[in-house]
Structures are given as structure tokens and as C-alpha cells.
Image (cartoon, rainbow, N blue to C red):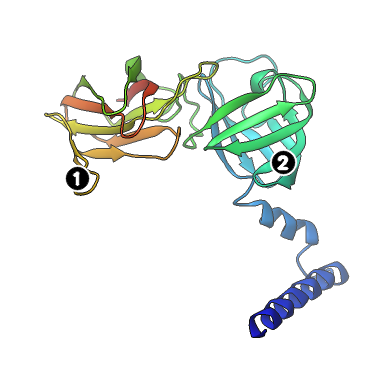
């Protein structure tokens, strides 16, 4: 009973606070409070492929990184506007059709397993991967290190549960930043389920018992089909060994290595 009373007391206080904001101009606007409530729900960065990214914030989403040329769309243009919550991780408002590069039309959005599913009314739905924000104008699939990045490796990799796929790349001297990433390509039905481990000079070591652990310079074990990524600042030159490991599932991923000198 005491807990119920506390809850009702807090609810009444919240309602009074909202009423006061509508009465006194010196207080925070109700619209501001509502927009703050969106943060953490309609929020995040998603990769459209070809270097394009959108950022969800408040009740809208905006192109924050532009990649390959798209007619009539630039970084800073809206991707979605007026999004209203309709259910658990579900929204409705104006969204882009044509795989994210068409017109703003009425439609639905839903976040499922770190992927944003967009369903424009009267048009085909599409999904985009959650990404890492990059406002530097990245090019190529997967985003990350900037417009002047050089691609060292870009290959589709498949494996079964328990497989350890090893790839070796040679990093030259003078590299300022290196990004190693696995992702699902836009328009391709890949399952980016593998964990990724990177180690300089020798293969990463992964063991399952007594606990899942590894010996590596970087380990990326994101959940579901999210991108795996390892970033190195001023990496030493030499041979880096990359392992994609099917921890609990088969996988098909695009493995991409980029460097900036």
C-alpha cells in the first residue's frame, strides 16, 4: 500500500509540473519536455550503405554523413520527421521511400535487433544497420574513418557455427587510424553474426571454457547482427591477424579494413 501511495504521489507531482509549464512562460515548454522524452527511444545512428548515415534524434532523423552522390539529397537533409511513438520501439510519421533516398511520405518505423525497419505507405519496406556516427563524410560501405580512407580489404566472408576464419593484412608505416569492421551490405541479405578478434603478429586465441574469453589486441562481440568494429590509432606497421568466429551461429558478413595516413 505504501508503494502504491508513493507512486500515486509521484504521478500527481508530475501532472502538476506539466500543468505549471503550460501556465508560466518562465518554465520549460511542454514541447521541450516531450522532445527530451524521445531521447533514448527514437535515437541512434544508422548506416544506409555507400557511406550514407542518418541520425535519429527527438522526433526526426537527419542525414549526417553523405557518401556516393544521390540526386537532390545532401548531408543535413531530413530522413524522417514528425515521428510519433505507436508501440514498443515503433513509430509513425514521414519517412523516406525508395530505400531511404526517395521522397518523404507517410509511413512506419521500427527498431528490431539493432536494425531500423522503414515501411513507407504504399512502398516496399527496407532495413538499415545501426552504425557508429561519423560526420567526416566517409566513403565506402560501413562508414568510420573519413573521406580520405584507403580500403585495404573488402570481402564477403561466410562460415558455420564454430568456424574461425582467419585473414591477414599488412599495415604500412605512417598510418594514423585503422578501422576493421564487419557489416551487412545494404540490399544484401547477410547475417552478420560472427564475433571479431584482431591481433598483431599472430592469430587471436579464443576459448569457450570455463568462460568465453580471448587473447587479442581487440575483441568485438556485439549482440545479434550489429556491426563488429575495431579501431586503432597510430597502429604499428606489420601483419594483423583478423578472426571471424561463429560463436553460436553460422554467419555471412562483409569484412572491411580501412586506413588513414
Residue 74 image-quadrant placement: top right
Q: Give the farthest residue toward the bottom.
A: 2
Residue 174 visible in rendering = no
Residue 115 image-quadrant placement: top right
The x, y position of residue 202, in whole percent, is 12, 29
The x, y position of residue 7, in whole percent, is 69, 76
* Residue 144 in the image: above or below residue 172: below
Query: Dot 1 corresponds to which residue?
Result: 209
Query: Dot 2 corresponds to which residue?
Result: 91
Q: Secondary structure at mark 2?
A: strand
* Residue 196 in the image: above or below residue 31: above
Q: Secondary structure at mark 1?
A: loop
The x, y position of residue 82, in whole percent, is 77, 41
Label 1 with label 2: CB-CB less than 8 Å: no
- Left or right position of 20 against 208: right
The residue shown at (57%, 37%) is 112
* Residue 207 in the image: above or below residue 124: below
The x, y position of residue 25, in whole percent, is 84, 68
User: Which residue is at the front of the view, 107 or 67?
Assistant: 107
The residue shown at (71%, 53%) is 35
Residue 219 visible in rendering = yes
Q: CA distance from mark 1 to mark 2?
A: 42 Å
Amino acid at each position: 500500500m505504501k508503494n502504491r501511495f508513493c507512486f500515486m504521489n509521484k504521478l500527481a507531482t508530475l501532472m502538476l509540473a506539466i500543468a505549471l509549464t503550460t501556465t508560466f512562460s518562465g518554465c520549460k515548454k511542454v514541447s521541450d519536455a516531450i522532445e527530451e522524452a524521445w531521447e533514448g527511444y527514437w535515437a541512434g545512428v544508422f548506416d544506409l550503405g555507400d557511406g550514407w548515415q542518418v541520425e535519429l534524434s527527438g522526433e526526426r532523423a537527419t542525414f549526417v554523413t553523405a557518401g556516393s552522390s544521390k540526386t537532390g539529397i545532401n548531408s543535413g537533409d531530413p530522413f524522417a520527421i514528425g515521428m510519433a511513438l505507436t508501440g514498443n520501439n515503433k513509430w509513425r510519421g514521414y519517412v523516406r521511400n525508395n530505400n531511404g533516398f526517395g521522397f518523404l511520405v507517410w509511413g512506419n518505423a521500427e527498431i528490431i535487433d539493432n536494425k531500423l525497419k522503414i515501411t513507407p505507405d504504399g512502398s516496399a519496406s527496407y532495413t538499415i544497420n545501426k552504425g557508429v556516427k561519423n560526420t567526416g563524410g566517409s566513403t565506402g560501405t560501413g562508414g568510420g574513418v573519413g573521406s580520405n580512407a584507403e580500403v585495404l580489404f573488402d570481402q564477403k566472408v561466410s562460415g558455420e557455427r564454430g568456424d574461425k576464419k582467419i585473414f591477414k593484412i599488412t599495415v604500412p608505416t605512417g598510418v594514423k587510424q585503422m578501422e576493421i569492421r564487419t557489416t551487412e551490405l545494404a540490399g544484401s541479405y547477410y547475417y552478420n553474426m560472427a564475433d571479431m578478434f584482431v591481433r598483431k603478429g599472430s592469430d587471436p586465441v579464443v576459448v569457450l571454457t570455463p568462460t568465453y574469453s580471448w587473447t587479442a589486441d581487440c575483441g568485438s562481440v556485439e549482440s545479434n547482427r550489429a556491426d563488429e568494429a575495431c579501431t586503432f590509432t597510430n597502429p604499428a606497421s606489420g601483419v594483423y591477424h583478423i578472426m571471424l568466429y561463429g560463436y553460436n551461429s553460422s554467419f555471412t558478413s562483409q569484412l572491411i579494413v580501412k586506413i588513414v595516413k
